[in-house]
Image: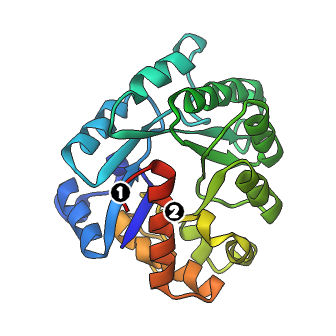
Amino acid sequence: MFIDSHCHLDRLDLKSYAGDLDMALEAARAAGVRRFLTVSVDLETFPVLRALAEKHADVYASVGVHPSEELPAESEPTADLLCQLADHDRVIAIGESGLDYYYHPEHKAAQQRRFAAHIEAGRRTGKPLIVHTRDARADTIGLLKECGAEKGILHCFTEDWDTARAGIELGFYVSMSGIVSFNNAESLREVARQLPLDRLLIETDAPYLAPVPYRGKKNEPRYLPAVAEAVAKARGMTVEAVAEATTRNFNTLFGLPQ
């Protein structure tokens, strides 16, 4: 059994499923994926994610605004609003939020204010925070510490071991995506080897970053076992052991039945 700890079900390419998301979910279930966390990147589409989680017993949702999402100041999500939207038993996480300086380093201050609001919402609701970080590792960890973040996931992890260790010390889990299977990702596989097994998660981030041997295709949750295989190979473990550990870790983090 696998759990996709981060996917975007509202953004999947459904051409091969005649536009039917239910068929895509069935294909993932047939591949052994038993739970899905569909992650919010903006508040406009959040109701769609919440409805998916209400419809499917194995789908859960998050609420949040991605750091690269450009909004007018008056539309910035407040901690109060995020807490209000998260007040639903199928909404189990805050985010994804974080810092991404790759495309818009000039927006650092605005991103930091948005991230701080998400961290506060996570603390107030007690729900884990889903963190995106790119070209901002020091500021990401610094703000998590400064704002008192308590638990969550460093998702689609691509940083170094020091960043992973700092996140773990703050109570976070580290999630590996299909990137860990790429030929040029040996440094990331080294991080995967060093991670404590009880802080490891896996994800697809579908429809992005399809793992080998599907690289170049639109990603989808049914490819998650390939991520587990890459992690297992890097760690010298069986795929079954990775599946068992990551499933247990996800359920522990989110307080779900094992």
Where does the image place residue 75, in percent across and percent down from the top left? 52, 15
The total of numbered circles placed on residues is 2
**Mark closer to the chain start, 1 or 2:** 2
What is the basis of the colouring in this image? rainbow
- The residue pinned by badge 2 equals 249
Q: 195 or 103: nearer the eye?
A: 195
Question: What amino acid is at disc 1?
Answer: Pro
Q: 44 or 34: nearer the eye?
A: 34
Where does the image place residue 219, in percent across and percent down from the top left? 41, 64
Where does the image place residue 202, in percent across and percent down from the top left? 51, 66
- The residue pinned by badge 1 equals 257
Which quadrant of the view contains residue 174?
bottom right
Determine whether, in the image, residue 4 is placed left or right of residue 54: right
Residue at the spot 42% in from the left edge and 61% down from the top edge = 4
Q: What quarter of the picture does the C terminus occupy?
A: bottom left
Which quadrant of the view contains residue 251?
bottom left
Determine whether, in the image, residue 116 is placed left or right of residue 84: right
Residue at the spot 23% in from the left edge and 51% down from the top edge = 57
Which quadrant of the view contains residue 98?
top right
Determine whether the residue tagged by mark 2 lies in a helix, strand or loop. Answer: helix
Q: Residues within 10 Å of mark 1 (few under 14, many from 20)?
A: few
Determine whether the residue tagged by mark 1 lies in a helix, strand or loop. Answer: loop
Residue 96 visible somewhere in the drawing: yes
Residue at the spot 48% in from the left edge and 38% down from the top edge = 41
Determine whether, in the image, residue 14 is placed left or right of residue 95: left
Contact? badges 1 and 2 (CB < 8 Å)? no
Against 182, residue 146 (above or below) is above
Against 129, residue 245 (above or below) is below
Q: CA distance from mark 1 to mark 2?
A: 11 Å
Residue 215 visible somewhere in the drawing: no
Question: What amino acid is at disc 2?
Answer: Asn
